[in-house]
Image (cartoon, grey):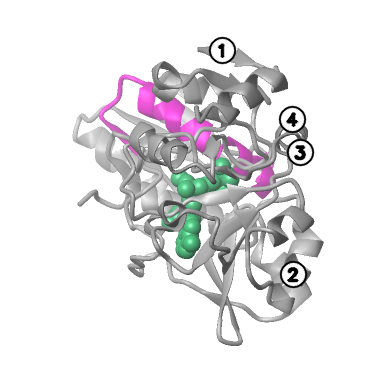
Amino acid sequence: MAISTDLILAKSFLEKGQLVAIPTETVYGLAGNALNPLAVAAIFETKNRPSFDPLIIHVSSLAKADSYITEFPKALRLLAEAFWPGPLTLLLPKAPEIPDLVTSGLYRVAVRVPSHPLTLALLESIDFPLAAPSANPFGYISPTTPEHVSDQLGEFIPMILDGGPCKVGLESTIVGMEGEDIIVYRLGGLEIDAIESIVGKVKLQDYSSSNPQAPGLLESHYAPTKPFILGDLSKLIPNYASRGKSFGVLSFQDFSEVVALEKQIRLSQNGDLKEAAANLFAAMRELDGMDLEVILAELAPDQGLGKAINDRLKRASATRQ
Ligand code: TXA
Ligand code: MG
């Protein structure tokens, strides 16, 4: 398995129907030719992902997106013009050439233009879109570095395109329309306020609502293997300490004075939500890899990117079915 910046090598694997992990500003994706059902099937197999969970296709420009959809509602086009390339995925009526396996038979396809120079150059060099879910085993934390990808999927893929650590660190915000309503299906790296500044009020799907159309919205997702307990750290820490449990702490801004520093990670010393978002998944992985029984965590302030951070924290703490 190669971890490299060689675009020609990446292209050659993709043209053969093989998979390559690609960097984006949000998280690393496990990419294959979206027009080749065998490559798409390999994505589901490699991720151990149920095939009813549809995939996002990645293209290099708004003009390219046009060729894989049948209609671009005006409000959504305005969002694309404002935020592509960037952490925004749009659900749009799909053109027939997109295989049903990509969309799980749904009438809409999820499309985005990622903002990463290497991946944009790769997308410009090929004549098909890349289907790419986050490059992690289904249900686990999304990868934000090449090492995260190689730790879990390295033995199953020929190459990771090395684009360094992801700058945003949270998956894209997913937006679509139902009638006249603009719906946010997944909170993510693009803030609601930014979206509303272009198209006015949007409707939000509650994090706990079950939505068979988008299993990424399943209550338990983005989850470490260790129990992940979310709450008020000033109460959780003495509680778990008194029970003799070994635990690690994921805090937003402050370290606890009663816990060893090496068992604590804080997301942002200055309480900066962007920095916290970029650090979140790496911090969850690091704590998951430590010799501990439990991870204790607290929510971020519930504003701006904090809403998406809190969505991921809540899903990480939800019990698996
Ligand atoms: O930032 C991102 O979006 C990353 C990078 C790699 O682009 N990708 C990503 O993909 O997070 P994935 O597969 O891990 O999550 C995509 C979510 C899933 O929850 C899926 O159910 C939903 O998008 N989705 C995809 N296509 C859909 C469709 N046609 N209708 C409804 N939901 C869809
Ligand atoms: Mg995912």
Q: Which residues are magenta?
A: 270-295
- The answer to which quarter of the image holds residue 103 is bottom left
Q: Earlier in the sequence, mark 2 or mark 3?
A: 2
Instruction: Residue 317: give x, y in percent of width and height.
Output: 33, 49
Viewer-proximal residue, 275 or 20?
20
Contact, CB < 8 Å: mark 2 with mark 1? Answer: no
Can residue 71 be seen at all in this image of the molecule?
A: yes
In the rendered structure, which amino acid carries the disc numbered 3?
A: Glu
**Ligand 2 picture quarter:** top left
The residue at the point 74 percent across, 46 percent down is 60
To which residue does mark 1 refer? 2
Contact, CB < 8 Å: mark 4 with mark 1? Answer: no
The secondary element bearing badge 2 is classed as helix
Q: Earlier in the sequence, mark 4 or mark 1?
A: 1
To which residue does mark 3 refer? 124
To which residue does mark 2 refer? 77
Horizontal placement of 179 versus 270: left or right? left
Q: Earlier in the sequence, mark 3 or mark 1?
A: 1
Contact, CB < 8 Å: mark 4 with mark 2? Answer: no
The secondary element bearing badge 1 is classed as strand
- The answer to which quarter of the image holds residue 66 is bottom right
To which residue does mark 4 refer? 118
Q: Residues within 10 Å of mark 1 (few under 14, many from 20)?
A: some
